[in-house]
Amino acid sequence: MIVDAHVHVGRFETIDLECDFEDIIRIADRMKVDKLFCTHVKALYYDYRLGDQEIYEAMRKWPDRILGYTSVTSPRHGQPIYDHVKKCIFDWGFHGIKVYSHPRGVGGYEAFLSVADRYMYPIYEMAQEWKVPVLAHATSEEMDVICRDFPNLTMMMAHMGCTPISGGDWHTAIAVARRHPNLILDTTASGMDFGMVEEAVRVIGAERVIWGSDMPMIDAWLNIDKIRGAEIRPEEKQLILGDNIMRYVKTGRETVEKIKRERNL
């Protein structure tokens, strides 16, 4: 099974780019990708409730293809955001949480809303208890802090440093992951450096690397071909291309269902 662990759906107004569920499924069919782990642009930038609602509806329409992240860009909404995340995970069947550090200005390099701020910690406490994975658009320094404070949280670093706010520094991302066994590196990248995948596998092992396309922001074919063409063993490629993320999904779902039974939720 091949699973794209990093997909966006919706319209990016600032760059005039749009992709709907039919688009990503059509591309996935051509690429022989079985499942798509999605966030909605509306949830990331405009209204988390509306965006997650559309993800939920897509999960019901394409239950064998679409997996959902509930998006959290600022828990400063207070209790409503915590209630919403719990509803998404427990009632709607979402399998993960997406958190996002916002850069200062378009194309900026400095994060002004950090996922490592204390206001985000209740989200991590919930995810750690439920054992659901968290995908973080963040810097290596932020990942270092969060993984230190939440050692039992499955934290997945989107782009493994290949973003403007991280300066494209995937070497530091690998070094941080080496210190923290709970940090998983997402190979979705805004850069296509040679040797990135091979080095991550060499240092932390293929069991802690996942693949994503970042559709529609980045060419999905380039991002999957750097795994398929990497100089690693076939069984390591399969871990990266699907087995790892589905293992985290399974663990989270089993834990959530157990909590629901025990607490009569």
Image (cartoon, rainbow, N blue to C red):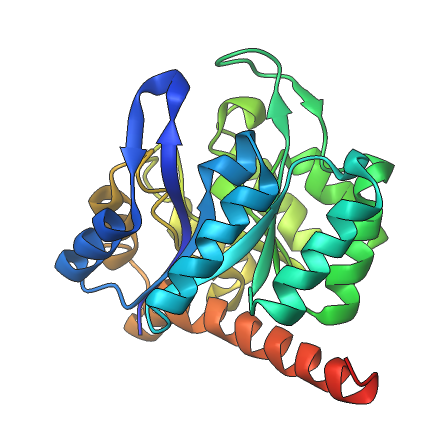
**Residue 255: which quarter of the image?**
bottom right
Decide if residue 96 is on the left or right side of residue 34. right
Q: Position of residue 159 (x, y in %)?
A: 48, 40
At 74% from the left and 82% from the top, the residue drawn is 260
State the residue lying farthest toward the left: 30
Q: Position of residue 28 (x, y in %)?
A: 22, 57
Instruction: Evaluate whether residue 11 shows in this view.
Output: yes
> Toward the viewer: 56 or 28?
56
Numbered disc total: 0
At 57% from the left and 24% from the top, the residue drawn is 165
Q: Position of residue 80 (x, y in %)?
A: 77, 47
Q: Which quadrant would the C terminus be assigned to in this image?
A: bottom right
At 29% from the left and 32% from the top, the residue drawn is 18
> Toward the viewer: 240 or 133?
133
At 41% from the left and 68% from the top, the residue drawn is 60
> Toward the viewer: 60 or 250?
60
**Residue 37: which quarter of the image?**
bottom left
Instruction: Evaluate whether residue 186 shows in this view.
Output: no
Decide if residue 50 is on the left or right side of residue 77. left
Q: Is residue 115 above or below residue 59?
A: above
Q: Which quadrant would the N terminus be assigned to in this image?
A: bottom left
Q: Is residue 44 above or below residue 110?
A: below
Q: Position of residue 208 (x, y in %)?
A: 54, 62
